[in-house]
Image (cartoon, helix red, strand yellow):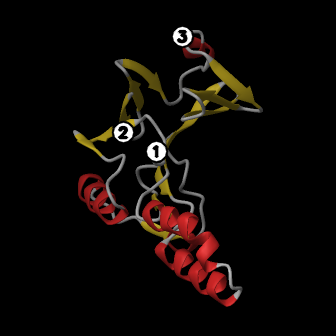
Amino acid sequence: MKIKLMPHKGVEIEGNFIGLGVDVNSIIKNYVFDKYDNIYYLYDNNVHIETDRNKICAIMCCIDAESPIELLYDGQCISRLEVDTVLEIMNKSLKEDAVILEEGHTYIWKNHDVCCGRDKTPNDIEEIICESKRDGVYEEMLEEISRDIEDSKYFTTICIGIEGCYKSISL
């Protein structure tokens, strides 16, 4: 499934536009979704649409290794590009360097209300390896650690928000 990411505007999913600031009731009739609180979950929870007073305020795409999403930004597929490559593309295109939060788990472009995140960083994996060796469970965790090493190279979520969405985040 192809999703085109357009900061401050919305996303295009397989040719259908979902706009930020739009009344969610105007678009959900076209989709099968689950809803919890103010978040609509589409495409097997791979797309999250967050609302505030029924207006779409953020759209998050989950792009982990199992995700069927091919996320396009600025004409390029960024779904399974390594973190440094995505940062290079986004920094150049947005003409803004990302702010790094949570020790490399989260990157935000405050002026464009774009956020990328990952569950584990390479440093996290190094800690897991040291702990598992210390605890004598390294061999039995090796398969999981190998998977985590690979996953830590990539973002697992990319979110866009309405204008001003990330401005209030203090650094």
Mark 2: few, some, or many residues within 10 Å (few <14, many ≥20)? many
Q: Residue furthest right?
A: 37
Of helix, strand and loop, which one carries label 3? loop
Q: Quadrant of the C terminus?
A: bottom right
Q: Which badge, 2 or 3, comes first in the chain's sequence?
A: 3
Circle 2 sits on which residue?
Answer: 71
Q: Quadrant of residue 38?
A: top right
Circle 1 sits on which residue?
Answer: 63
Of helix, strand and loop, which one carries label 1? loop
Query: Measuring 42% from the left and 35% from the top, which residue is drawn there?
Result: 69
Q: CA distance from mark 1 to mark 2?
A: 8 Å
Q: CA distance from mark 3 to mark 1?
A: 22 Å
Q: Out of 145 and 30, give the one closest to the viewer.
A: 145
Q: Is residue 165 above or below residue 70?
A: below
Circle 3 sits on which residue?
Answer: 30
The answer to the question of whether label 1 and label 2 lie on touching residues, with beta carbons closer than 8 A, is yes
Q: Which mark is residue 129?
A: none
Q: Is residue 107 above or below residue 56?
A: below
Query: Measuring 75% from the left and 31% from the top, which residue is drawn there?
Result: 36
